[in-house]
Each structure stands twice: as C-alpha cells, then as structure tokens.
Image (cartoon, grey):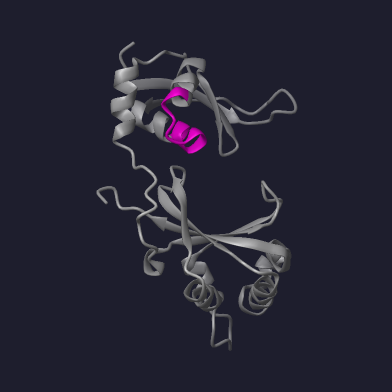
Amino acid sequence: MTLPDTVAVRYTEDEAEYVSLRPVVRQTFQIRELVDMILAVTGKDVARVAQILKSGAVAYHGYRYWWKGFEPADGELVELLAAYPDADPSRPFDLKKCSAIVIESGESPPHHTFNISVAAASTRRFLRTRSFWDELTALAREARPVYRDYSYARRADVYVSEITPARAAQLAAAAKSRLPRSMHAKTGFLAQAARILWIVPREPSS
C-alpha cells in the first residue's frame, strides 16, 4: 500500500488497568508526525514500525493512539525512515550543546530517574555561589561521557557517564544544597545513582 499523506487518529489517556472514561480526541496526523511518535517507541526498526502501522495502535507518553491500520510498501517505508538520523558513536561529546541530563539508579530498568534541564540545573539558590550544573560540569570533565545512542523521542544524541558511589554521594549533597527544596523529593535517591545521561540535541542537518 502507498503511504498515505495523512492518517485519522483517535487518542485518549492510557488507563490500562480498567475501561477508560476519558474523552476520545480525534485528530488528523501527517504521516511524518505519526511515524515520529512510533519511532520514539520502536527506534529505527523498519519491521517494528511497519508492524505498528499495520496494527493501528501505539501507547506513547501516557496516551493510547489508534487508527485504521494499513500495511505500507517496504520500499516507501525504508525511504521515509532513511530521512531520520542514525546513531553515530563517532560524534564527540560537546558539553556546551547539552540541553538536559537524566540521572538513573542502578537497576535495569532503573527504578528511579531524575530529569532536569541545563537551564534549571544552572540556577543558583539565594546566597549560593555554585549551581548544581557546576557539579555536573566538573563530573563531565573528570570522566568524559561516552556515546550511547540516538533518542528519537528527544531528537538528541545520548551520552553516558557511569558514576562511583563516592561521586553519587557528592551529587546527592550538591542537589540538597543547590537545588530548590521543591526538587528534593525527586532527588532523594541520588546517593544510590549509578549513571548520568547527557542529552545533546542534534541539528536536523548535522
């Protein structure tokens, strides 16, 4: 089947444990918009993307989307996905281009995560001379983050720094003294943190 230009989509909040009483929203997606969302779930896997387009349903960011499923021609789907970036381990880490960080606990998948933008991490509390971002910058310079993958959900390259228990304790102390008190409930696990993910958006043409 030729890929349609637009797809009629319905969606509602995803309440998997019981029948949802939330309103259903109807919206027309450009095919690229729909594929953007699917890639965030599947990664750049032609077979999986094709399977979801055919099944006509996907859960994403707390919502469930569905449409009349269709089976795209392999060649057209391959051509469409070719326009999306690939993971590129040769890309050097550039701290200045980092937009956010994610700190994870050691389990797989991690039980605890803390997401914060560079802008928020750079804010100094009253009478503090250093920010939480200063602590993270020092860590990045000590142990250069290594490339992990490309995130289609974030449209960014992701780098990772594994951290020692001693470094995790330092991060926890820095978070307590330098971040707003409203964030402390989210950062209570940092003494047991195992890694930091550095989010570096990739320009469309790069």
Instruction: Point out the residue furthest to the top here.
Output: 1
Which residue lies at the image location 34% right of the left edge and 23% below the top edge?
Answer: 77
* 165 left or right, relative to 41: right
Residue 65 vs 71, above or below: the answer is below
Residue 98 in which image quadrant? bottom left
Which residue lies at the image location 58% right of the left edge and 80% below the top edge?
Answer: 125
* 122 left or right, relative to 96: right
Residue 154 vs 54, above or below: the answer is below
Q: Is residue 118 visible from the viewing direction of this image?
A: yes
- Identify which residue, 101 or 126, lies in the foreground: 101
- Identify which residue, 110 or 19, lies in the foreground: 110
Q: Quadrant of the N terminus?
A: top left
- Identify which residue, 37 or 42, lies in the foreground: 42
Residue 58 vs 115, above or below: the answer is above
The percent coordinates of residue 75 (x first, y second) are 30, 19
Q: Which residues are magenta?
A: 37-47
